[in-house]
């Protein structure tokens, strides 16, 4: 499963299933943010361009913008997060997913694989 | 880890939420050794401190502590501190980490002949064990504490180690601040956690410290007040004893009190997800009236809370204001302070038996 996951330098992850792309924030991102208390997410139907800001994650420490890793139309948001934003901390790659998008273009060429993302975060931390 | 006044401190050990709730429901253990510890000693020590501090040390007997401010000539707050009177002529002064050097320099500037000022920050460590069950969750081989009054302290043992046990804190909860020789502090820390873990005790980081102090509406120097804010504006007029005699800032503070302060620190609550951050603009009836000084999401209360400094001598509870959150205006309601009164309230009653 995790082999199929792709990452952005802005700490989103995505998985692709046909035309449907599931988006979340990475384990590294959630650990840096600390306890998530609120997510502002777009309504289904909204069209997003690549790297367009689609929402905000509020943790106790700070508010951080979220960016679309691909161009697509929002087809679902994780409704559970309204009542349980801590799912983003507890299970960032599972129950803590944020959005499902219907892909409207090609996958950007600069998405990172697991090793690439790991190298990018280690470089940032180092 | 975050930088806090030049000290590396954990924002959280595991989770701010869990640590915050542990402090409110059982007890949390904070490493607060970053705070400055100064010893003032000598025949003129009381008179010297009386001349620098706003509160009245003449009312403080040996074995008791007092919360006080230190002000500039113009009444601006240099720092807020706790002064522990160990003997008639020896005082332990605990100051904010970020102000330790500034405070020391200011105090040295005013130091008279015959009074000594020593910095013991590095050799005397400080931890805080805070929560409604902190008393009964002290580890074995600890001195009894139930008869230590609130804001009193005395030498004793914690887990067999010599400590100055002080019934003070910065969370709104009952509990202790423990002064222990730095080479022994690790032993005490480990013993408290080993004993308390199974009862819900957790080590707690800066995030939980900020959330609990904010719920209790305890001011944070550098956020809620600084040298441009006077004690009355910060809602700390109760620490200013104008009748005790001369002290630095007294003349200016007499005027502020006569003319009423122009600003006031108010409490705000917002809907979940609307987190007021330090510096966010506060408006009332379309006019900017001030800014948020501290804000966070309170896991314990279930909604965000904030303190804001506004340009008005007072602001009625229940009033609606607007605050800037993520570039937009969001509604906030003025509420009574503190946001939460913890077990420290009952600690102010005569000591339990």
Image (tube, coloured by chain):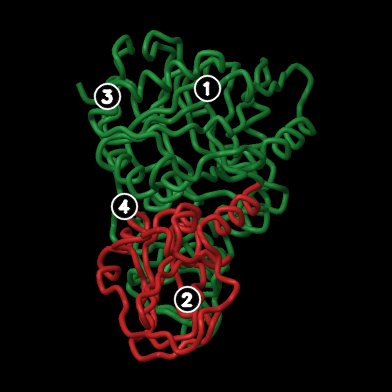
The mark lying in front, picked from 4 and 2, is: 2
**In front: mark 3 or mark 1?**
3
Q: Colour of chain B?
A: green
Q: CA distance from mark 2 to mark 3?
A: 41 Å
Q: Which residue is mark 1?
A: B85
Residue at mark 4 to residue at mark 1: CA–CA distance: 29 Å
* Residue situated in front as seen by the camera: B276 or B114: B276
Q: Earlier in the sequence, mark 4 or mark 2?
A: 2
- Residues marked 3 and 1 touching at CB (< 8 Å): no
Query: Between marks 4 and 3, how big is the CA–CA gap?
Result: 23 Å
* Residue B69: quadrant of the picture: top right
Location of the N terminus of chain A (image quadrant): bottom left
Helix, strand or loop at label 2? It is strand
Q: CA distance from mark 4 to mark 2?
A: 22 Å
Q: Residue at x 43, y 71 (%)?
A: B315
Q: Mark 3 highlights which residue?
A: B137
Q: Which residue is mark 4?
A: B340
**Label 4 close to label 1 by CB (< 8 Å):** no
Chain-order first, disc 4 or disc 1: 1
Mark identifier at residue B183: none
In the picture shown, does residue B94 fall above or below B16? above
């Amino acid at each position: 499963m995790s082999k199929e996951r792709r990452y952005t330098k802005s700490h989103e992850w995505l998985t692709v299933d046909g035309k449907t792309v599931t988006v979340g924030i990475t384990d590294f991102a959630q650990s840096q943010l600390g306890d998530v208390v609120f997510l502002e997410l777009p309504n289904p139907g909204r069209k997003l361009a690549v790297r367009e800001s689609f929402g905000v994650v509020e943790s106790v420490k700070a508010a951080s913008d979220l960016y679309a890793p691909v161009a697509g139309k929002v087809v679902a948001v994780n409704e559970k997060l309204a009542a349980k934003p801590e799912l983003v901390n507890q299970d960032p790659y599972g129950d803590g997913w944020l959005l499902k998008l219907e892909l409207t273009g090609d996958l950007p060429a600069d998405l990172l694989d697991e090793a690439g993302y790991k190298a990018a975060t280690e470089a940032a931390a180092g | 880890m975050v930088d806090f006044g030049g000290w590396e401190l954990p924002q959280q050990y595991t989770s701010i939420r869990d640590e915050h709730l542990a402090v409110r429901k059982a007890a949390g253990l904070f490493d607060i050794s970053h705070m400055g510890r100064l010893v003032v000693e000598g025949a003129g020590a009381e008179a010297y401190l009386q001349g620098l501090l706003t509160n009245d040390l003449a009312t403080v007997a040996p074995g008791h502590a007092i919360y006080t401010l230190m002000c500039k000539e113009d009444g601006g707050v240099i720092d807020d501190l706790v002064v522990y009177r160990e003997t008639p002529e020896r005082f332990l002064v605990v100051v904010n980490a970020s102000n330790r050097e500034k405070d020391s320099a200011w105090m040295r500037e005013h130091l008279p002949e015959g009074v000594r000022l020593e910095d013991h920050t590095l050799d005397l460590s400080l931890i805080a064990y805070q929560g409604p069950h902190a008393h009964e969750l002290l580890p074995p081989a600890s001195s009894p504490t139930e008869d230590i009054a609130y804001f009193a302290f005395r030498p004793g043992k914690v887990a067999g180690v010599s400590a100055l046990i002080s019934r003070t804190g910065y969370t709104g909860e009952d509990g202790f601040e423990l002064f222990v020789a730095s080479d022994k502090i690790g032993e005490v820390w480990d013993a408290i956690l080993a004993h308390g873990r199974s009862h819900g005790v957790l080590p707690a980081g800066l995030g939980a410290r900020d959330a609990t102090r904010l719920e209790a509406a305890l001011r944070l120097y550098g956020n809620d007040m600084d040298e441009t804010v006077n004690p009355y504006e910060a809602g700390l007029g109760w620490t200013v004893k104008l009748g005790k005699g001369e002290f630095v800032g007294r003349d200016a503070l007499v005027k502020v009190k006569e003319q009423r302060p122009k600003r006031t620190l108010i409490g705000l609550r917002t809907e979940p997800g609307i987190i007021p951050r330090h510096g966010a603009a506060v408006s009332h009836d379309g006019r900017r009236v001030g800014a948020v000084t501290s804000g966070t999401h309170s896991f314990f209360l279930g909604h965000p809370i904030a303190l804001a400094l506004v340009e008005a001598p007072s602001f009625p509870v229940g009033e609606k204001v607007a605050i800037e959150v993520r570039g937009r205006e969001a509604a906030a309601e003025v509420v009574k302070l503190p946001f939460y009164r913890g077990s420290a309230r009952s600690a102010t009653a005569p000591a339990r038996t």
